[in-house]
Each structure stands twice: as C-alpha cells, then as structure tokens.
Image (cartoon, rainbow, N blue to C red):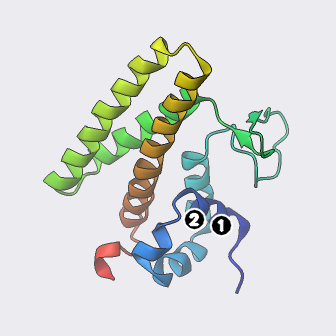
Amino acid sequence: MPIPPLLALVLREAPGLVQQYGPSAVEWLRQHPDLVRDLVAQVRPHGRRDAEPHVAGEAPGEADPDGTARADVDEVIAMLREQIAYLVESADDAVELDRAEAWTIRLRRLERARGLVGTAAERRRLEGQVERLRAEVVAAFLIERIEDEGGPSPRDR
C-alpha cells in the first residue's frame, strides 16, 4: 500500500522516524489522517512547498538552487520555539526535559547570532546550524505528539 502524500511529508521531515519506530508508526499514522495533517502544519515551515501543492493565498518561499522552496530562518526559529515549548511542557521524565531545555539554550544562541549575521557565508553557516537543530527537534516533536495522541512509542518496539 503506498504512503499517503501528507504522511510522506511528515516522514520526510524526520527520516529516522521509521527506523526508530518500525512499520507500526506508519500504519498508526495512516489510520489517523487528521493528526498527520496537523503534524504537517506544525513541522513544515510555510516556505517549504517543494513537495506540497501550492495553497491559494500563500506565497512560496525563496527558491534554493535545486528549485525547492526554502523557509526563512526567522520562520524556522519561530516554529522551533513552539515545538520546543511543547516538548518542555509534555516531557515525561527528566531526560526529555533536560534535552528540551538544552535545545532552548541552543535556539536562544541561534536567535542572538541571527542579529549578528552579516556576510553570505555567515548566513549559510547559521542556516546550517538552524537546520541541524530543526532535524533533532522535529524528530523528537513528532515522537512526542504521536505518543501524546495514543500512538506507539519507539520504546515499545
């Protein structure tokens, strides 16, 4: 059975999710399309329209050299701020809370650096750091949201 397009978008944002969960998460997510739509809205910055149909009234993001849309760093930082706040609030143990608080500190540093960026090379370096943080946070956010909605946990595997 093919993976629904919105589910494919979620899995693309956190490629390691299937490896962590195994096929049980994909099957569970297939059965919960409303959650998948919600997750797509929460993990894909508006500038990321590369694999999504264009929504009327929304401008696509700036194009990367490969032709895909790129989200603005400020937009990604704002999205990360919301996801990290959710992770802090829904932390199940001290390890999850410590990890979310460490991400909060990293995000604050990136926000401060955003104001100091001057050259194109500095901007690219900052974008790379933001994307690395984003990859970590999005994976944890997806796992936490799925668990909070009654879905499987990688720990159950």
Q: Which residue is mark 1?
A: 8
Q: Amino acid at mark 1?
A: Ala
Residue 76 as seen in the image, left or right of residue 5: left
Report the amino acid beneath label 2.
Leu
Q: Residue at the spot x=42%, y=22% of the render?
A: 111
Pointer 1 local density, CA inside 10 Å: few below 14, some 14–19, many at least 20: some
Residue 97: x %, y % from top left? 21, 47
SS assignment at label 1:
helix
* Residue ID for mark 2: 11
Residue 60 sits in quarter: top right
Q: Secondary structure at mark 2?
A: helix
Q: How dense is the environment of label 2, judged by Cα within 10 Å: few (below 14), some, or many (20 and up)?
A: some
Question: Height in image: 72 above or below 89?
Answer: above
For the view shown, which residue lies furthest in the front direction?
A: 121
Residue in view at x 19 percent, y 46 percent: 98
Total marks in image? 2
